[in-house]
């Protein structure tokens, strides 16, 4: 897949095959350390035996351990572990600024959708649950995807249909992420984090709700290494705000501000224990996977 | 609208380069970026959107144009709406204007001066007891402002008739002549028929904020009528303009020390009098009145009155002598005694000319012969036997007959107090019959020889001991007697009256309205239009500069 082709499919079959060998890694959720279905100590409808306890009125008669009754002449009930999949919430910033692209490169939103599709592929391949939240000031629609090819196809379609609109509002995405997953989840926020309300507002809100958070910063190459715009008037794609730059020194001031901004994100992410991935819209997918593995978001499946 | 310097209006041409500078200013290249969040730190100006930036720029342009225009108009000095009028402004400065009207009157005049036309000639007249021209007619603003600064209240009434006469004489015959009277409408002196003067008169009436006033309308001292000594009494007359009874405290003080302090009840719109016995020789007496009922006092100018009692020794004495050789020693000793008593000037005059040269503050000293008619002034008679006398001569006493031996002397009287007549050799004396009301002070065996009487300017002292036929003039008693007589006569002649605010002002009575009422000057800003425009222009351009500096405008 050509990373610079804006019209390329989100995840090609080759990449999907390679992603099947990966699994999500949640640092604070032990169930995410194994591939596939996760066991919990919660008694439920699984197959793995955990323990027995005396029969009580109302227990399912099918769970009575008859061999034990034969030996002990006591009615005991078998306790089995419940099957609990990992919940993955993909929060994709769909504000207007994410629609920016330069020099024919895919927009930030397209790149974010690709990364989200890749992560969803990893999750759904491992029979985990995935929810997608598109976050902007105009709306935060939620898509819950089930496993299998059908669910994956629907999720690709939804990600492909995302369009930039409104302003950044990551804070509002926190509750939407909870609705998408139905419980504690691994929340991956894909955004440029150019949120006037604070780049980590959404991450902190999600962390406060018990989610584990990972941050993926997607920027256009012109945002990372801008040309000399001194003496220009700049119009904000998202808000329409206009700033007038001085005749010289604007780029240096911008780069200093970007470094300060990123340092603030790193510090905030460290506070909430969130890994940070920084990618540009021209970053190849393999490189992104390597970055994700290095950041501890993905891991290779050895078994 | 007229302008004092209309040529400077050409400065409005500056608006063109300002407009051009806005239109051709360097246009920046517009670039769209995902977010200006990080660019703000480097920006020189910001706007919420293109529309707001356009509006801001238009507003900045408008402010700049208005600011420049205001400065140009200020430089051209807009002068007002009138053309070449000659106006005499007569301001009532009587005491009643103090009741909340004077400062407003001053501001009204200031506004009238501020909106005057460029060619207007203004005269400013203060209408007090006597009209005073403060300025003009002139168009010189500095002179008019100086005149306005000299506008002061006076503790008296207003002769508006005389002030209008003065104003008429100043503006009559001039183009657009008129008189503006600024007054509280109080009762005023002078002929109120102003329309006869041939100059249109308008009145701007400023009503007092309060008509509750108490004040002193009369303050005088005079010799005490029921006392034989040199005691005096002060008379204080207090009045109120209030429509309800008032209670006040009246105090009389001498040289800063309270002599009396009384509560006085005043009837509604009435007056009351107060008598205070004075037992000290005060150099300066002050009477004050203060409300004691908690009600405010509208005028303070009439709350105090001061006077200095008349001199007890006259400055000039008219020595009436025939100038004969026989009278020579008597005249000499009499003159010496008068000078020793403090008289600065002694004028010798014959009896037939005395009345013509006597002034009201003189004292007359008559030797042997008095004038045919009495002068209306205190008089000391020394052995006088002829002319118009206040006493009836009883007989001439001869020393050889033993009639001139001292029988009694009134030592408590102010005239004879401290006079020692024991041992005085008297060869001849004139005994008199004191008239009713007069006092017999010294009696010899043959009759009364020293007497005093009369009141005020008609007071007199008669000494019947002949100075030429006794050794009295050689004794210490003589200058003492003369000095005491002069003291008594001088004090008796001085009914001192303090200058007080006229009762018409204290009572705040309204006078007749005979002038055309003028509408209020609608312009309320207390600065001149040129200064206002200048300030406005400077503020606008300063705001413009600040907006550019802060980056609010690009």
Image (spheres, grey):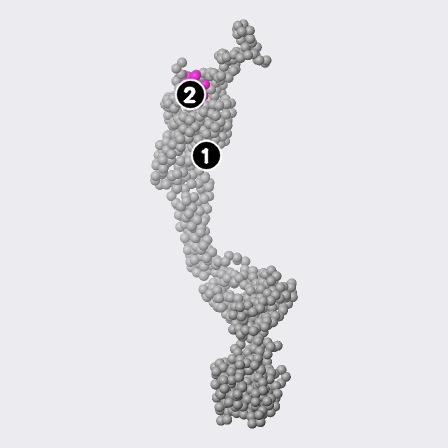
Question: How many discs mark residues in the rendered view?
Answer: 2
Residue A144 x/y as whole percent: 50, 22
| Mark whose residue sits in front, 1 or 2 | 2
Residue visible at 57% across and 92% down in the picture: B402
Camera-nearest residue between B9 and A299:
A299
Residue B343 x/y as whole percent: 49, 82
Q: Is residue A302 above or below residue B359?
A: above
The quadrant of the picture occupied by the C terminus of chain B is top left
Residue matched to label 2: A25
The answer to whether residue A21 is magenta is yes
Q: Chain of mark 2?
A: A
Q: Chain of mark 1?
A: A
Residue matched to label 1: A197
Residue visible at 43% across and 16% down in the picture: A35
Residue visible at 40% across and 26% down in the picture: A275
Residue range (magenta)? A11-35
Neighbor class of circle 1 (other Cα within 10 Å; few <14, some 14-19, many 20+) is few
Element class at badge 1: loop
Element class at badge 2: loop
The answer to whether residue B346 is magenta is no
Residue A82 x/y as whole percent: 50, 15
Q: Is residue B502 above or below residue A70?
A: below
Camera-nearest residue between B71 and A132:
A132
């Amino acid at each position: 897949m050509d990373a610079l082709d804006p019209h390329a499919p989100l995840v090609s079959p080759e990449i999907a095959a390679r992603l099947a060998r990966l699994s999500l890694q949640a640092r604070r959720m032990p169930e995410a350390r194994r591939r596939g279905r996760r066991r919990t100590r919660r008694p439920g409808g699984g197959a793995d035996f955990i323990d027995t306890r005396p029969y009580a009125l109302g227990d399912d008669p099918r769970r009575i351990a008859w061999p034990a009754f034969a030996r002990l002449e006591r009615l005991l009930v078998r306790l089995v572990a419940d099957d609990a999949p990992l919940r993955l919430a993909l929060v994709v910033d769909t504000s207007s600024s994410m629609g920016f692209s330069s020099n024919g490169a895919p927009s930030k939103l397209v790149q974010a959708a690709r990364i989200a599709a890749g992560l969803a592929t990893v999750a759904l391949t491992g029979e985990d649950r995935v929810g997608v939240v598109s976050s902007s000031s105009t709306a935060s629609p939620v898509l819950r995807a089930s496993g299998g090819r059908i669910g994956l196809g629907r999720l690709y379609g939804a990600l492909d249909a995302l369009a930039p609109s409104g302003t950044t509002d990551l804070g509002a995405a926190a509750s939407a992420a909870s609705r998408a997953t139905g419980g504690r989840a691994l929340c991956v926020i894909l955004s440029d984090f150019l949120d006037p309300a604070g780049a980590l507002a959404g991450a902190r809100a999600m962390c406060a709700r018990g989610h584990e958070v990972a941050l993926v910063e997607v920027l256009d190459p012109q945002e990372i290494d801008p040309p000399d715009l001194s003496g220009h008037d700049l119009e904000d794609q998202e808000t329409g705000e206009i700033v007038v730059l001085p005749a010289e020194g604007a780029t240096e001031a911008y780069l200093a501000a970007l470094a300060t901004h990123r340092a603030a994100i790193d510090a905030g992410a460290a506070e909430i224990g969130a890994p940070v991935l920084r990618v540009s819209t021209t970053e190849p997918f393999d490189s992104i996977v390597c970055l994700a593995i290095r950041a501890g978001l993905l891991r290779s499946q050895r078994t | 609208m007229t302008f004092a310097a209309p040529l400077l209006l050409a400065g409005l041409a500056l608006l063109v380069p300002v407009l051009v500078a806005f239109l051709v200013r360097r246009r920046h290249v517009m670039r769209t970026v995902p977010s200006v969040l990080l660019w703000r730190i480097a920006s020189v100006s910001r706007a919420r959107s293109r529309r707001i930036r356009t509006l801001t720029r238009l507003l900045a342009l408008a402010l700049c144009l208005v600011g420049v225009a205001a400065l140009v108009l200020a430089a051209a000095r807009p002068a007002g709406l009138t053309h070449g009028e000659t106006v005499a402004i007569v301001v009532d400065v009587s005491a009643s204007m103090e009741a909340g009207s004077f400062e407003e009157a001053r501001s009204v005049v200031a506004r009238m001066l501020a909106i005057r036309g460029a060619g207007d000639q203004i005269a400013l007249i203060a209408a007090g007891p006597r009209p005073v021209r403060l300025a003009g007619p002139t168009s010189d603003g500095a002179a008019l402002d100086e005149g306005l600064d000299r506008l002061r209240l006076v503790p008296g009434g207003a002769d508006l008739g005389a002030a209008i006469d003065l104003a008429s004489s100043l503006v009559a015959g001039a183009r657009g002549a008129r008189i503006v009277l600024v007054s509280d409408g109080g009762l005023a002196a002078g002929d109120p028929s102003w329309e006869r003067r041939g100059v249109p008169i308008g009145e701007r009436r400023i009503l007092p904020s309060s008509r509750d006033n108490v004040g002193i309308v009369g303050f005088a001292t005079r010799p005490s009528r029921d006392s034989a000594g040199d005691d005096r009494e002060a008379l204080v007359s207090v009045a109120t303009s209030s429509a309800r009874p008032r209670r006040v405290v009246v105090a009389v003080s001498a040289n800063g020390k309270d002599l009396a302090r009384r509560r006085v009840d005043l009837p509604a719109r009435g007056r009351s009098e107060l008598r205070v016995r004075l037992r000290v020789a005060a150099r300066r007496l002050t009477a004050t009145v203060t409300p004691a009922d908690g009600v405010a006092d509208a005028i303070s100018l009439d709350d105090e009155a001061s006077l200095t009692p008349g001199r007890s020794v006259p400055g000039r004495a008219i020595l009436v002598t025939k100038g004969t050789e026989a009278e020579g020693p008597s005249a000499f000793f009499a003159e010496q005694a008068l000078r020793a008593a403090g008289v600065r000037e002694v004028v010798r005059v014959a009896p037939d000319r005395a009345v013509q040269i006597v002034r009201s503050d003189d004292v007359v000293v008559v030797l042997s012969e008095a004038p045919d008619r009495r002068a209306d002034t205190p008089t000391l008679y020394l052995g006088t036997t002829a002319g118009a006398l206040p006493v009836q001569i009883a007989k001439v006493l001869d020393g050889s007959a033993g009639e001139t031996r001292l029988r009694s002397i009134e030592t408590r009287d102010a005239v004879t107090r401290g006079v020692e007549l024991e041992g005085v050799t008297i060869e001849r004396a004139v005994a008199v019959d004191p008239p009713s009301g007069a006092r017999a002070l010294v009696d010899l065996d043959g009759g009364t020889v020293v007497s005093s009487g009369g009141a005020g300017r008609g007071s007199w002292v008669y000494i019947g001991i002949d100075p030429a036929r006794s050794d009295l003039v050689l004794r210490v008693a003589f200058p003492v007697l003369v000095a005491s007589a002069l003291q008594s006569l001088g004090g008796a002649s001085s009914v001192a009256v303090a200058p007080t605010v006229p009762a018409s002002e204290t009572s705040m009575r309204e006078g007749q309205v005979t002038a055309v009422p003028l509408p209020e000057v609608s312009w309320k800003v207390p600065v001149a239009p040129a200064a206002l425009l200048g300030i406005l222009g400077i503020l606008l351009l300063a705001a413009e500069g600040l907006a550019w500096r802060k980056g609010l405008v690009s």
